[in-house]
Amino acid sequence: MDMHLTPDIAAFQAVLDRLSPDDRARVDAALVPAAVKAVEAAPHWDFELPAKAVDQVLGADASNDVRRGLVAAWTLQLPDRVRAMALPAEVMAQYPYWIEQLAAFLTKAQGDYDFDHWSKDVRFSLALSVPAAKSQVIDLSSPVGPGQIITHVREGWGLKPLFRYLAAGAKREPWLEVHTESRWLRGFNEDGWNEAWATAAELCRGRPELAGMIGSSWFYDPPLTAISPRLAHLRLNPLNGGAFMVHQGPAPIHTERAGTASASRKALIDSGEYTARSWLMVWPRKELIAWADRRKAV
Ligand SMILES: CC(C)(COP(=O)(O)OP(=O)(O)OC[C@H]1O[C@@H](n2cnc3c(N)ncnc32)[C@H](O)[C@@H]1OP(=O)(O)O)[C@@H](O)C(=O)NCCC(=O)NCCS
């Protein structure tokens, strides 16, 4: 299995070589224990927990160079990890691009290590999350407890998700969870998202224990169909393919993200005409695989 890591080995090695001897010793000492803690934390709903667990092993005074060195060292070991995982061809095809992107990011990076990037890089370099398309990554294990579904019903958003959740097997775990990679957005478009969902379907096909795939974002909010029509496919395509949506609600992080790139959305938020709300998109495995099969047939 060729992950095309070879052209980038020198870049990851250079990230390690520029460390001071003390920092390098710190990376070497953390390599195994921090990976163990990250793996233990990975199935939690908190996407950032593996990075937080690694930070605990590293200690509060660890520098961002040490963090980058650790990601480089884990990425050099990534082909061995991935080889043991029997991932579908759709995932494997994404690795060369993602490794190249990560090599370029680590090579240029100095100073701060944005916590979202650090969280994603810990998961990626340890194969706790795998590439799904150019701008989407998939966590291999995420929970969907009944709490959010019950809150959705109790707050008057409708009964449908409850029936769908029960039909999907309620206690069945784990789920895949998809995330956007904001550092490389080339695939943040309808084709890119379809590719990501098709990759998730192949992961489900190969792993019968998986319940399906979820995603959580402000961009599944129904008013966006009118406000930002170019984002409507994000909600409508999964819905048309058999997914269901669970209301999660407003929060400062959703307001901030929804207002980041679009001046017109920001104006509506600032004037109080629109409140960004997050929704959980839940695509059960049966419907997701059927969607992927229909897509292959056309
Ligand atoms: C999610 C995100 C990447 C989507 O970006 P996007 O595909 O460009 O879509 P947006 O609706 O946000 O569009 C941004 C603006 O650029 C404009 N635009 C986007 N693509 C364009 C194109 N090809 N040509 C001209 N204008 C374009 C849009 O018109 C929009 O401005 P407007 O709404 O005022 O008209 C972006 O909103 C973002 O980075 N958000 C913050 C991070 C985030 O939320 N990540 C997801 C976490 S769940």
Image: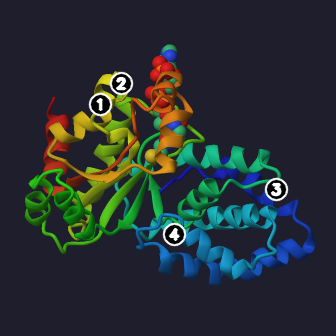
> Residue 181 vs residue 197: left or right?
right
Amino acid at pointer 3: Ala
- Rounded to the nearest angstrom, the CA distance separating label 1 from label 4 is 34 Å
* Percent of width and height locating residue 33: 63, 84
What residue appears at the point 32 percent right and 69 percent down from the top-left corner? 143
The answer to which of 113 and 162 lies nearer the viewer is: 162
Amino acid at pointer 4: Arg
Report helix, strand or loop for mark 4. Answer: helix
Labels 3 and 1: the sequence-earlier one: 3
Amino acid at pointer 1: His
Residue at numbered disc 2: 227
- Rounded to the nearest angstrom, the CA distance separating label 3 from label 4 is 21 Å
What residue appears at the point 39 percent right and 43 percent down from the top-left corner? 218
Residue at numbered disc 3: 14
What residue appears at the point 92 percent right and 68 percent down from the top-left corner? 20
Q: Is mark 3 within 8 Å of ligand 1?
A: no
